[in-house]
């Protein structure tokens, strides 16, 4: 199963504070472990929400809202995409992760939908389209 592992933002990350060398080294070692174990598919840090926007949808209307966004605890400062056997395995990896921020923080783990999760709603044509899209992405990587 694939899981999205989201590092929640902190006051410091939203202020644009960069991690120090010790944290960068610890996270680098952790990421190397993930890669060697075949778990890590992707992972990146994100700029503060002051550099981002949100697009709100209401029917056919689209509204762009500039950051920063107020609720730090609801923001994401970085992410990984992991391939694991179970949610329990993802939790065990997260327990081994260095604290991503100098202050207290939280990591959220959520399963990624797979094609089979959609059942009959995903027609054979849509399944074929999904396979073509994934092949195209893989070819560009």
Image (cartoon, rainbow, N blue to C red):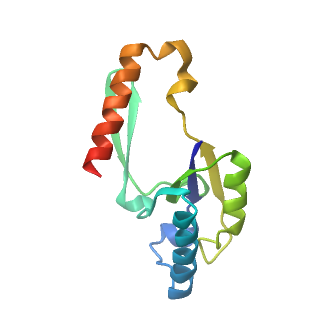
Residue 6 placement: quadrant: bottom right
Where does the image place residue 131, in percent across and percent down from the top left? 37, 30
In the picture shown, does residue 115 fall above or below 42? above
Residue 7 placement: quadrant: bottom right
Where does the image place residue 40, in percent across and percent down from the top left? 52, 58
Q: Nearer the viewer, residue 128 or 92?
A: 128
How many marks are shown on the rendered structure? 0
In the picture shown, does residue 127 fall above or below 132? above
User: What residue is drawn where x is 57% and y is 25%?
Assistant: 117
User: What residue is drawn where x is 65% and y is 46%?
Assistant: 85
Question: From this viewpoint, which residue is outermost toward the bottom?
Answer: 21
Q: Nearer the viewer, residue 89 or 52?
A: 89
In the picture shown, does residue 104 fall above or below 71? below
Where does the image place residue 10, in percent across and percent down from the top left? 58, 66
In the picture shown, does residue 131 fall above or below 109? above
In the displayed structure, does residue 78 sit left or right of residue 102?
A: left
User: What residue is drawn where x is 52% and y is 71%?
Assistant: 32
Where does the image place residue 84, in percent across and percent down from the top left? 62, 49
In the displayed structure, does residue 52 sit left or right of residue 100?
A: left
User: What residue is drawn where x is 53% and y is 69%?
Assistant: 31
Q: Quadrant of the N terminus?
A: top right
């Amino acid at each position: 199963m694939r899981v999205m592992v989201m590092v929640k933002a902190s006051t410091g990350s939203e202020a644009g504070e960069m991690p120090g060398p010790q944290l960068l080294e610890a996270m680098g070692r952790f990421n190397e472990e993930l890669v060697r174990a075949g778990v890590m598919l992707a992972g990146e840090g994100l700029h503060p929400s002051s550099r981002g926007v949100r697009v709100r949808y209401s029917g056919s209307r689209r509204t762009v809202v500039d950051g920063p966004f107020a609720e730090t605890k609801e923001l994401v400062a970085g992410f990984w995409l992991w391939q694991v056997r179970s949610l329990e395995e993802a939790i065990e990896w997260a327990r081994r992760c260095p604290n991503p921020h100098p202050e207290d923080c939280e990591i959220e783990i959520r399963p990624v939908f797979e094609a089979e999760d959609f059942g009959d709603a995903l027609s054979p044509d849509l399944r074929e389209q999904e396979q073509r899209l994934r092949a195209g992405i893989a070819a560009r990587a």
